[in-house]
Image: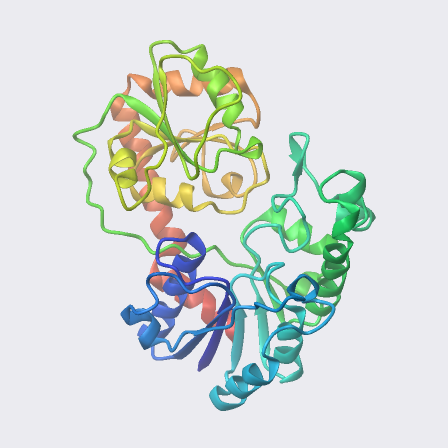
């Protein structure tokens, strides 16, 4: 089988790039021919073996009209048609399907009578705020009442009217795809509202390549860790408020971009800026007592969650979105009702001085991860989808 994967990144340090690489490697290992098209910038890994092996083509849209890319064609469509004709894929897999992908590209693939798979990872294919979140609850106003709601709710401005038109047009085009891949129940509901037929929605996890990290929890530190985006919808203010009432318990925050909190923090909270996977984040996670994921939005499967499971770390998370389907309270995580500060405090204290419980939760989390996203599991699911 020939598969063309179209995405926005294959960068080895970006979650989206990791997903595309993992899917491509699994397919090729099982004898399929794979090529990749990227609609985004080249990164410093451009000359690595992966790019050569999968003949990665970059199509960066640098047209001065690219803001109108769903209204007028601004991509090299004829060049893309040549690739489709020369490679003649059986499947075109958009990983991800999001707002950055031109509707004309989806349209070309559909008109070529190729099976087109759209895989949304987050909600930016319809939501201007990307995370379908407003006022501490899930938001689907734009697909419930029309995209003009994004202006009424101050998610965007009238000068960005073109982006509203773009979303309307890409939704209309996307309806003709063969299948949509959904990673959880809430995404199913969003796709229903997006006017996708139920028989076109298939459950498929966001793939993650499990790393052999050993079982090195013997040199555990004395702190809990939060890392990633420090945004309202990630529950960062709630987390800080809880730890301000836990004087004897340490929290380290490793933000993905520079963070200067708007609220006062206490001495048991340490913010560590400018640390990434390249210079120590992995070690910080490994040494932590547990990873806290206080996400308030109806999350898809965050790579933070997968990574914590891979490190065999105890996880404390709000019971929302994909967490409801992957995590089981007391078995592979401590689950707290979304936004419950008292419950979060109690959850932290319940494992703070119980290393045996932390180890049990972490080992069970790792087992769960292997059942979700091992190469055989992902491959078999892909074959069911593609066939």
Q: How is the image coloured?
A: rainbow
| Residue 38 placement (x, y as % from top left) | 48, 69
Where is the N terminus found, in terms of image quarters?
bottom left
| Residue 361 placement (x, y as % from top left) | 33, 32
Q: Nearer the viewer, residue 74 or 126?
A: 74
Quarter holding residue 68: bottom right
Above-or-below relation of 238 to 157: above
The residue under the point 74% across, 51% down is: 160
Above-or-below relation of 255 to 127: above
Q: Nearer the viewer, residue 227 or 343?
A: 227
Quarter holding residue 181: bottom right
Above-or-below relation of 328 to 57: above
Above-or-below relation of 126 to 315: below
Give the mark count.
0
Going by the image, does 114 lie left or right of 154? Answer: left
Going by the image, does 227 lie left or right of 295? Answer: left
| Residue 355 placement (x, y as % from top left) | 25, 23
């Amino acid at each position: 089988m020939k598969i063309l994967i179209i995405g926005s990144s294959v960068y080895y340090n970006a979650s989206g790039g990791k997903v595309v690489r993992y899917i491509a490697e699994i397919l090729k290992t099982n004898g399929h021919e794979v090529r990749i098209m990227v609609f985004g910038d080249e990164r410093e890994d451009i000359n690595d073996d992966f790019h050569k092996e999968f003949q990665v083509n970059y199509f960066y849209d640098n047209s001065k009209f690219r803001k109108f890319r769903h209204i007028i064609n601004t991509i090299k469509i004829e060049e893309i048609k040549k690739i489709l004709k020369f490679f003649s894929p059986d499947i075109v897999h958009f990983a991800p399907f999001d707002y950055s992908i031109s509707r004309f590209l989806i349209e070309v693939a559909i008109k070529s009578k190729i099976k087109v798979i759209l895989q949304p990872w987050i909600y930016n294919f319809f939501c201007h705020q990307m995370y379908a979140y407003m006022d501490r609850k899930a938001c689907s106003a734009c697909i419930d009442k029309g995209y003009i709601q994004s202006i009424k709710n101050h998610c965007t401005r009238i000068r960005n009217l073109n982006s509203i038109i773009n979303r309307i047009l890409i939704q209309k085009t996307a309806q003709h795809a063969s299948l949509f891949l959904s990673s959880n129940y809430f995404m199913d509901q969003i796709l229903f509202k997006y006017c996708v037929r139920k028989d076109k929605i298939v459950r498929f996890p966001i793939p993650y390549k499990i790393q052999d990290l050993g079982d090195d929890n013997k040199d555990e530190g004395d702190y809990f860790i939060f890392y990633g985006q420090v945004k309202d919808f990630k529950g960062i203010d709630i987390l800080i408020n809880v730890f301000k009432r836990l004087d004897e318990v340490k929290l380290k925050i490793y933000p993905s971009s520079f963070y200067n909190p708007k609220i006062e923090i206490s001495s048991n909270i340490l913010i560590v800026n400018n640390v990434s996977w390249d210079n120590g984040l992995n070690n910080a996670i490994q040494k932590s007592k547990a990873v806290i994921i206080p996400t308030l939005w109806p999350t898809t499967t965050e790579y933070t969650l997968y990574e914590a499971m891979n490190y065999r770390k105890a996880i404390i998370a709000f019971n929302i979105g994909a967490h409801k389907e992957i995590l089981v309270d007391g078995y592979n995580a401590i689950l707290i009702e979304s936004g419950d500060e008292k419950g979060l405090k109690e959850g932290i204290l319940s494992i703070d001085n119980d290393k045996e419980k932390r180890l049990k939760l972490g080992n069970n989390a790792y087992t769960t991860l292997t059942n979700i996203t091992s190469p055989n599991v992902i491959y078999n699911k892909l074959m069911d989808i593609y066939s």
